[in-house]
Image (spheres, rainbow, N blue to C red):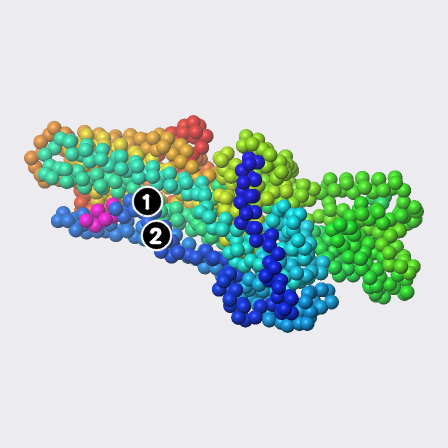
Amino acid sequence: MKKIIKTKVKKEVTLTNYVKLDHKELLKKIDSNQFGLSEKQVEENRLKYGENKLKQKKLNVFLTFIKSFLSPFNIILIIIDAFSFYSYASEDGDKFDLIGALLVLFMIVLSGTIYFVQEIRSHLVIKKMLTESRQQSKIIRDVDFNFKSVDNANSIKLIKEAEHIDNDEIVFGDLVYFSNGDLVPADTRIIWSNNLYLNQSSLTGESFPIQKKDTHNSDKNEYLEYENICYTGTEVVSGSGLGIVVATGENTYFSLIDKKVKEKRPKSSFEKGIKKVIFFLIAFMLAVTPIVFIVYGVRPGDVDNKWFNATLFAIAVAVGLTPEMLPIIVTSNLSRGYSKIKKNNVVVKNLNAVQNIGAIDILCTDKTGTITSGEISLDKTLTFTNQKSEETIEKILYLNSYYQSGFQNPIDQAVLLSKKIKVPNLDGYEKEWEVPFDFQRKILSVILTKNDQKEIFTKGAVDEILKVCNRININGEIVEITDEHKTKIIDKSHELNQEGFRVIGIAHNVLEDEDIEDDLVFYGYATFYDEPKKTSKEIIKKLEIKGITTKVLTGDSEIITRSICKNVDFKITKLYTGKQIEEMDQEQLEKAVREANVFVKLSPIHKTIIIETLKKLGHVVGFMGDGINDAPVLRESDIAISFADASNIAQEAADMILMGESLMAIDSAVTEGRYSLANILKYIKVTIASNFGNVLSVLVALFLTTVEPMQPLHLLLQNLLYDIVMFAFIFDKVDQKFLAKPRPFTTKNMIWFALINGPVSSIFDISTFLVLLYGFTNKVGVIPGINVDDNLLYNNSKEMFNASWFLVGLMTQTAVMQMYRTEKIPFIQSRASWQVNVSTVFVCSMAIIVPYTPINETVKMATPPLEFMPIGIGFVLAYICLAQTVKLGYIKLFKEWL
């Protein structure tokens, strides 16, 4: 494992060697007193080095169309439909062949159109989001001054010449001015800075800012450690600086991650499952059709054009076996789920994501900006004796944060926005001096005067604060600080650190003349934490109830991560660092990802490897992230979730984008995903079982009688009426038990489902045949071996036989869906939706109306004996009872139903 990680990192460093350059050819501009490019140079560099744009993922409308309409299953439907049109065009063809062909074609077009429109709509939504997030930067071009280098004194002259330009218009060699709050528009080499600090957490996962300055990088081994390079997409949090653009667009480090995002994404469990089902159905159809053709051709009976008729009948059986509604059922179910999820302010970028979100059993999430708001908050202030903080401590802390003007860090913002401390009276205070914060001293002091009294207000790392303190305030009394005091202070600080709080020390002193940061009085502590999102705690619990394990994958430190986990009541089972992951072999890694639920100090490569390993172990894995560094991990997951304020590259990689602040939309999406899968499985499993039973029935009927058990037209009509019920199942209710745990789409037990449940229908089909053949011989029966001299009698018998089996076959196939839609007792423990109930009653009614009304002549049937109707209905009721019994046995054997 260690070897694999090192190989990948080495490759990325090679691709980013440009950051090691000092770009002397660009710095020569300083010697000529020219700062920024002329208009001519801008155009030359744009042509030579390219625009500051990443290649946008364009929608290939043609390929999207092909993908939507020419799936493997649709191709089979198109071939069969073409034969139907051919049959209509032949001499023996009639209008029913045309009607059937047109209906199948309509289903193909409808399902393809729904999928195609959804793809186009998702693309346009994302494109609009990217367009609206257009950014500008301050660029200095073609300015002449009489100085050869930039320093603190003359930098202001350049800064005043800066103009706002769209980031897309920036070119190699441009001079950029950065200030607090700016996003870095291109990889830039710093030539001057004033306490410039950048937040690189979107690249590294580290929440604390990095200082950038004009220096060399000879002692740096990691590309993200270079102090003189500002990377695209990072954010200026403090100070200011000037830099020369050294890489734009496709040449930036950002683009390397973007290219990873655009690599072909691994297929999700749903895509793999649907593919297996489609090929199983195709294989089943291709295997059965020749058998039916041969049995039909060799059976007894002197029928003209036997083998041609055998071909027509085999094709008709193939049509009957083909669940032509599969594409539209899948697409419609996912579209319904999409509509429900969208109402919760979520953008769904592809339909398959609807099912994938319901399938996950593990949700991996970054910490900062996902389960947390990314904003540090003040927790409390404490005295040395751990008592409720004094007003003096709050005053020192507030004045320090209010008057400091250097590094605008999250701690100062937390202090100024906190409602836990009383805001002191600021009247009369004037700022004299500031000792700015830096990451070596880790202390910040401001010196203020009021009524001619000079005071110093200091905060910083506890260890460093103690170095500048010689006294301590204990219960209002100032005494000399001792080693025992310092030990207690450090121990308390470590204790708070172990609880996950960031701790700073607070000190103060009244000054005489000199502005010195020494001989201060230690007053107490202030503790801070990264504020979790309001719904973080609730969503973790909700997902746990639904059987989804949450794992935290972060680039941040262990201590801060532990704090966040504590604040959201997330119990850490085991924790590993990125370095530990590197040192593991495959077996150790698999054990680690199973046991641990928190991983810290991770690089994007570490995160990707963890996701890959979880998937290899059979899990369906989701990932939630918002940073540039999360993009490769998002692409590797089965379902990728991001946010409206996430980086563009993260949004590009995501399947779902949460537009609101609440994470509870994830819970709703999981439910809708499982809901959609349930109704898809109802169609697939029951249709496969039903088709398998029909094949057995047809084969038996061919041996029992010379009558064709059902004509191609009848098979088509039965399929179309049955599809009405199937379409209604898009709106069916789903048992809570099915929604209670992860539901990956799998073909497991699907064959057993067909083999066990399919023959149940054949039992009653064969019983129907025998009753018709022997109980109603003179009316509908034609038994093998009997010479049929009277063609009229033969035809009448055949049409009665067909009508009788149509009645039983359609009613059993439709009514049993009420049994198969739930593992519970239908009507009593689980009730179907009104759409399903209405369609069931309608189709069962049509099973009687068609044979027993003049409609039968239109579809080439004869009216069955009236006394057969109660027998047929009796078979239907017996089938329902037996199907429920077999279902209970199946559930006991396989521990599941759908």
Could you say which quadrant of the image residue 166 lies in? bottom right
Q: Where 506 falls versus 185 (above or below)?
A: above
Disc 1 marks a residue whose amino acid type is: Phe
Which residue does the image show at 78% across and 50% down from the upper left? 441
Which residue does the image show at 75% across and 50% down from the upper left? 440
**Few, some or many C-alpha atoms within 10 Å of disc 1 (few <14, some 14-19, many ≥20)?**
many
Quarter of the image with the N terminus is top right
List the residue tagged with mark 2. 66
Real-space CA distance between mark 2 and mark 1, rounded to the nearest whole angstrom = 13 Å
Where residue 642 appears, x then y in whole percent?
54, 51
Could you say which quadrant of the image residue 489 lies in? top right
Most foreground residue, 331 or 829: 331
Q: Is residue 212 left or right of residue 125?
A: right
Q: Is residue 580 left or right of residue 44?
A: right
Q: Which residues are magenta?
A: 80-86
**Few, some or many C-alpha atoms within 10 Å of disc 2 (few <14, some 14-19, many ≥20)?**
few
List the residue tagged with mark 1. 73
Q: Is residue 606 left or right of residue 681?
A: right
Query: Is most of the magenta stretch helix, strand or loop?
Result: helix
Callouts 2 and 1 close, C-beta under 8 Å: no
Most foreground residue, 807 or 574: 574
Q: Where 709 falls versus 255 (above or below)?
A: above
Most foreground residue, 218 or 576: 218
Count up the numbered dots: 2
Comparing labels 2 and 1, the label whose residue is closer to the camera: 2
